[in-house]
Amino acid sequence: MAYLIYSILDVNDIWHWNAPYTFVVTVFRLLSLLFFFMTVTMVNSVASIFSGGTIPNDLVIGLYNTLILKMWYMQPYGASGPLTNLQEVWTSFFVNLWQVLGDLWNNTFLFLYFLLAGIGIALFLQSLVRMNHKFVGGAFLAIQSIVVLASYRALTVPDLTPFPTDFVVFLLQRAQLLALVSFAYLELSYQMIYSYSVGKPVEDREETLKKQLLALRQATRKQDAIERGESVRTTGMSRTAGATAFSFLREAIERKVVGTQDALENLDAVADVRRLQIYVDELLQSDSRAHDELTAKAASPSSGYIIGSTIIGSIIRFLSVVAISFILMSPGVIVVLLDLPPGILNSVEMLQPEIVLLLLVPVSLLFPFVSMIISWMSQREEPEKPKLSKEEREAEKVRRKELARRKREAAKARRERARARKKRKSSEAEKDEWDKALEDTYGSA
Amino acid sequence: MITQRGFVVVFSGVLLLTSGFAFINFYLVLLGVYLVIGLVVTLPLFALTANLAGIEVDRQIDKVKIFSGDFVRVRVTIKNASRRHFDFIEVHDQYPETWILAIGENFIASRIEPGGNITFSYILQARMRGRYYLGPTEVIMRDRLGLHYYKRTLKEQTEILVYPTWKDVRRMEALGKQRQLGLMFGAHRTKTVGMGSDFAGFREYVPGDEFRLIDWKTSAKRGDMVIKQFEMEKNIQVICMVDTSGSMGNGYPENTKLEYAIRAAVLLTHMGLERKDLVGTCVFSDMVHGYVAPGLSMNHMYDVLEVLAMAEPKGWSDYETAIQYVVEKTRKRSLIIWMTDLEENPAPLLNAMKTLVANGHKAMVISPFGPWFEAPVGQFGPVEKVLAEAVSEELWERRNKIARALARFGITVVNVGPEDFLPTIIKTYEQAKQRGVAMF
């Protein structure tokens, strides 16, 4: 893909290998020009203060330029010797500034082509190692962005204008070949990432379990050693190795190391780790399938089917995408299909790329619409299971009734007590000794 | 549903299409069309195959009732009951937030054949008591390119009851073994005279006394027949009144006032059962949530644990309703230990105590004192510290008033913090045994 783009764009004579260097030099030139102008203007401004508000004569400027700026690299700006007049400096600055800015504009694009090519290749190499969609997509976009930029600069770029009406001609065009290769790269990479990722979680799971069991074993042994009074190397239970992936043990360690000073708390943390060790040991001994279930080894898919289905799936997708895209993009097909009136048929718009939208939008929306209907119908197939069985519902009803009854009774009893209290309060003569005790206590306080 | 990756493809396609339109370049347009069509072309096929109704999930656990801090293995089996291949399926089995994943992983990603199944398991540690549910299970199916997905949540949940922690009992047993003390050591010292082994005193012989009880030596010295008496060993009946009002939920998540009260109740019940005493439990707030009458049955401990496991801090404390309920259910004299933070009005509490004493029961209050269960004072700034001290003084003063009022009924109030909650309950029980309070 990168080579095809390189060879197609090569006719524009843009692949100057010194382009990045030229770009950097141009940037520095611009900066140096700005610096030169600023310093000369500032020196003259300062000198004018001392010379009574008038611009210093040519001798001062010439002297400054000769003594201070004689080493300045002025050749690119057409000044071979020191400029003695301030007006000369300003004129020279404006002329050169536009020239340098123009150079910078041109060089920026050259630089961007190289930069995007570099990013694309780097991401492609990354995608080989890391098998990640981000790298694949990034590489694809970076390489295609070169064509987008070159189109903007109106260079000779891969193009299919006018769009061929013959499918075979369409397939054999060089630009189409580039488009096919680019799309195939995306398609194949994504399929390969699927093949890789479908088996990876099970492998990761097994690896994690190994680490967890090892970390647990080490933690228990270390604790035993501490209890026996032996010295223990701190690396024995490294927090960076196994324990980082093991939240339970990590928390236990934190509770012990940085938790409260409470000895019982420490005891609990140690006991938890030990109990877990015993639990796991017993589990693995009593159930021969326990280890396989923890690692989910049986869930690992067969590689033969994956490879086969990947190839078939890729081919089907690839061919259908190319065929549908050709139909969508070819105005000839539209003419046949829609039987358009001559006004539209002979219009210039038929030759414009925007004509693609005429079919692309409805067709591309048709697919999600169909899938939406299918998934809606699939949901209908899903059996609606009752949440609770009849007995459970009955039990729940009884429980709620009982709760409501108890609440009612409690409220009723409260009301009665409140009434009784009110009655007691009104009859002063019948003062209860317990109430008196209460009053005594709170009255005296 | 389009994934994030799918949206990136859409964005790239639109970018290339608009670039093609802008620069009148059919190559860029074609590439854009490839991407857009490539994204949607297999969508109907994927929708047809990704009928997640064909996926069945079965979850199995070793035990449905465990203690807080225990480990439990969860086995999840995913079965493809349909006739379709699921190219990439992700299964996430959810577990309660407060629990800890000890070993393994609670999710799996793989492909599944028609009629095939995948089994994976993981080990969890239950950290807090209560009724919990494992699940639901989230099943996500992706297409091969990861551009689309369908998600389905299988609502089947597995109920699991977590009893309060058993660590206090384990710790006490470990200490008991270390000290080589018998369970009954020093526990039965009552004032009741009767059949026993400890000497209590002498009394004059009355007709009908057994001859074997006559102490001949002392009778010879006194010149009159005397009977040797022994202290009778009797058991006591205790009822724990655990207040579960909202204020009892204050404190750190695993160390609230209620949690300590529950731990104390568990410890007390265990000690009682070990020594053949009758210990009952009442869980109440504005109503009685659960009551386990004092007993010695095999399942008594589990009944108590179940009631305590369900306790939730909410509502307010209605002492009168609670005691009314307990008094009605309890005929024998009992020692009633209240575990409450005394945050409610004192009048209903005093009325409740009145009822209790009037029915011949003894009582005491073990009260977790609020500020000690809150954030440590060390974490406060100077202003918060002053405020905290002022509030503490105010509360302390209030508690003193309540304590003075209750003292008139012979009921003591013990203010406890997290450190001395459990030792206090042990001490209270031992003292009750030694004083012979509420014997039956």
Image (tube, helix red, strand yellow):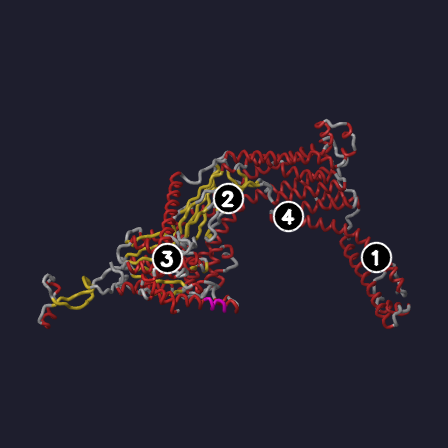
Q: Disc 1 marks which amino acid?
A: Leu
- Counting residues from the N terminus, which is met first, the one under dot 1 or under dot 4? 1
Q: Nearer the viewer, residue A130 or B427?
A: B427
- Quadrant assignment, res A26: bottom right
Q: Position of residue A378 (x, y in %)?
A: 53, 34
Subunit bearing disc 3? A
Numbered badge on residue A135: 4
- Pointer 2: what residue? B138
Q: Disc 2 marks which amino acid?
A: Glu
Q: Position of residue A376 (x, y in %)?
A: 55, 35
Q: Nearer the viewer, residue A425 or B407?
A: A425
Looking at the rendering, the stretch of residues picked out in magenta corresponds to B385-391
- Pointer 1: what residue? A97
Q: Is residue B266 visible?
A: no
Measure how far apart labels 2 and 3 are at the Cα level: 58 Å
Front: mark 2 or 1: 2
Q: The N terminus of chain B is located in which quarter? A: top right
Measure how far apart labels 4 and 3 are at the Cα level: 80 Å
Measure how far apart labels 2 and 1 are at the Cα level: 64 Å
Marks 1 and 4 on same chain: yes
Measure how far apart labels 1 and 3 are at the Cα level: 98 Å
Front: mark 1 or 3: 3
Numbered badge on residue A30: none
Marks 2 and 3 on same chain: no
A382 left or right of B435 in image: right
Q: Report if residue B81 lies within the magenta region.
A: no
Determine crowd level at label 1: few under 14, some 14-19, many 20+ residues with C-alpha closer than 10 A: some
